[in-house]
Amino acid sequence: MGRPLGRIGNLEVRLASSDKEVAAAQEVRYRVFYEELGARKDASQTECSDADRFDHICDHLIVLDTSLPGAAHRRIVGTYRLLRQEQAVASGGFYSESEFELPGLVARHPDKRFLELGRSCVLPAYRSRRTIEVLWQGIWAYVNHYDIGVMTGCASFHGTAPAAHAEALAYLAHHCRTEEAWDVRAVAGRYHAMDLVPANDVNAKAAIGAMPPLIKGYLRVGARIGDGCVIDHEFSTVDVFVVLPVKQIAERYVSYYGAEAQRFAA
């Protein structure tokens, strides 16, 4: 799947097809997570690259600005890391299971193929609806190609204090929780409650407005949120868990993204 999976204007989305492109995606992640958002750099980390043991088993979805000069790896402006269930099982598990009880959820749905979405980031100049839409074109083409049944993954609020996001977290807890069949909980010892504000005191408009664009985007397409949040001190974030069964994606988005992605998913 090295060919294009989607395109809007000068933005093209596809899978990284070389070590150079994966390294360039890791550099974009470093610029966003470490230089911009203040993730904590390990003492042994000398390169300007965000990399871990999962990268070699994942597919790396990349957005390229085709109007920029130079080789393809120099045109990468956004990225998403995709970990399919088969690769996770063969390599010791999913990234997010250190924070959430994902293995239990997977075990309850043996007929579904899971996909973990992670390490989503876009360079500041490209943080627009158009970039998000081209990323979703790529994800939808990928989901159809591999017959994915469920998308999951962590999504983050900046900082390490859940109370700083009390209203937004409470809105998710009161109005956006997973159904029982898809419920998943933060792991014991890392669990932090999200219902920090009573349901009647939550201002929905303010709460939604305070959410990161990625979380709002997930909610728009029909995703639900697991039980509890987790503080990730390495990346200085408060993480929630997103669950999105493919059959529950809002019909208007299936029609919208599907019509575009069908050109690329064959």
Image: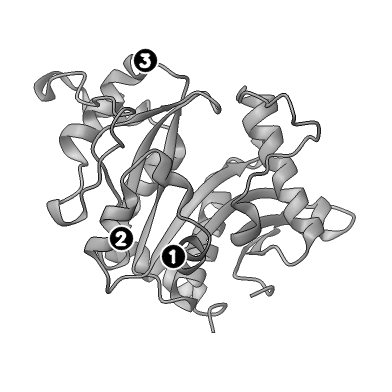
Q: Secondary structure at mark 2?
A: helix
Is residue 14 positioned above or below 33 on the image? below
Image spot of residue 167 (x, y percent): 26, 21
Q: Is residue 67 visible?
A: no
Separation of marks 2 and 1 at Cα, in angstroms: 9 Å
Badge 1 local density, few (<14 within 10 Å), some, or many (20+)? some
Say few, some or many: other residues with alpha carbon within 10 Å of mark 2 (under 14 / 14 to 19 / 20 or more).
Answer: some
Circles 2 and 1 in contact, beta carbons < 8 Å: yes
Dot 2 or dot 1, earlier in sequence = 1
- Residue on which the image places disc 1: 85
Judging depth in this view, the residue of 140 and 156 nearest the camera is 156
The amino acid at mark 2 is: Val
Marks 3 and 1: in contact by CB < 8 Å? no
Which amino acid, by three-letter code, is at mark 1? Gln
- Mark linked to residue 164: 3
Say what amino acid the circle numbered 3 marks. Ala
Q: Position of residue 164 (x, y in %)?
A: 37, 15
Asked if one can make out residue 262 in the rendered structure from this viewpoint, the answer is yes
Q: Can you say which quadrant of the picture contains the C terminus?
A: bottom right
Name the residue beneath numbered marker 2: 106
